Amino acid sequence: MVEIIEGLRFASALAELKCRIQKDEKIEPYSDILDDKFLMGFLRGKKWDVDKAMICLQHYIKMRTVKYKNFTKLYRPSTVKFLDKGVLNLLKHRDPHGRLVLLAQINKWSPSEIPADEAIATALFIVDEGIRSFLSTGNECVAIFDCAGITFAQARNATPKKIILLIDMFTKNIPTKPKGVHFINHGFIVHHLYRFASPMLEKKIRERVHFHSNTSQLHGHIPAKILPTSLDGELETEDAFDTSQDAVVRGNDYFYERLASELQIVKK
């Protein structure tokens, strides 16, 4: 009975959201690529509140086609090299609360090989697919940033403009808020960057940020049994990371080509 009620609730909310999209001149041109799973990610992320889901979707389209349209114009999932570097990884197993866990291993990114804008674009591609593949079945996530070996070359890319862009892109138009943000193997560079960024974060997010001096502290939040050995976890790399999504992400070129094709008619 609960599943039937849940299904009817979703069907009603989805129908209403689609109706509103058809009446919105800035979103309607992209309605053919906003499939049910994608829209379900926004609805679940906003706890079935159609008003909030619509506002979030409006922000999403604006970010991709107006405010930061160069990412949409210049990059495609099938050609970004950053996706092969293993910097951003989804864990195969969810945490004890059923939340999706994303691990960023900063030391695997070399700015001399891959520019920061390509790294950001790749993160967008992964998050966008996450809306469709994961947020459509649950709306909570956790992020771990392994900052071991962070260099000044990497830190120099974290300009005030880039930090503002990252906060804008990943906290204001994604239909979920991280339930935990964990930093491990960090140093003064990371603390300095966070001190600059923290005033721009929502209070709820700031309260969920944790800096761990050792992996034992991290394991108090994310159990070792689902973590890779690089974080003193119990799993080898191939058992810890879900690499099946890489091919799915790479197959999304058409989504961004459609966004780019309408850039000329989107009004600011």
Image: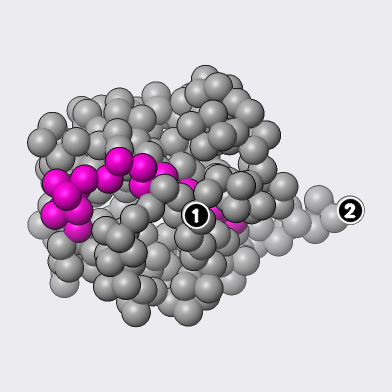
Q: Quadrant of residue 134?
A: top right
Q: Is residue 110 above or below residue 99?
A: above
Q: Secondary structure at mark 1?
A: loop
Residue at 19% across, 41% down: 118
**Which is more toward the observer, 218 or 115?**
218
Amino acid at circle 2: Met
**What are the residue bounds of the magenta stretch?**
136-158
Q: Can you identify the residue that label 2 sits on?
A: 1
Q: Can you identify the residue that label 1 sits on?
A: 213
Graded by Cα atoms within 10 Å as few (under 14), some (14 to 19) or many (20 or more), the crowding at tag 1 reads: few
Is 30 included in the stretch rendered in magenta?
no
Q: Mark 2 vs mark 1: which is more N-terminal?
A: 2
Amino acid at circle 1: Ser
Inspect this view and state whether residue 35 appears: no
Left or right: 116, with 222 as reference point:
left
Q: Position of residue 114 (x, y in %)?
A: 15, 36
Residue at 19% across, 58% down: 158
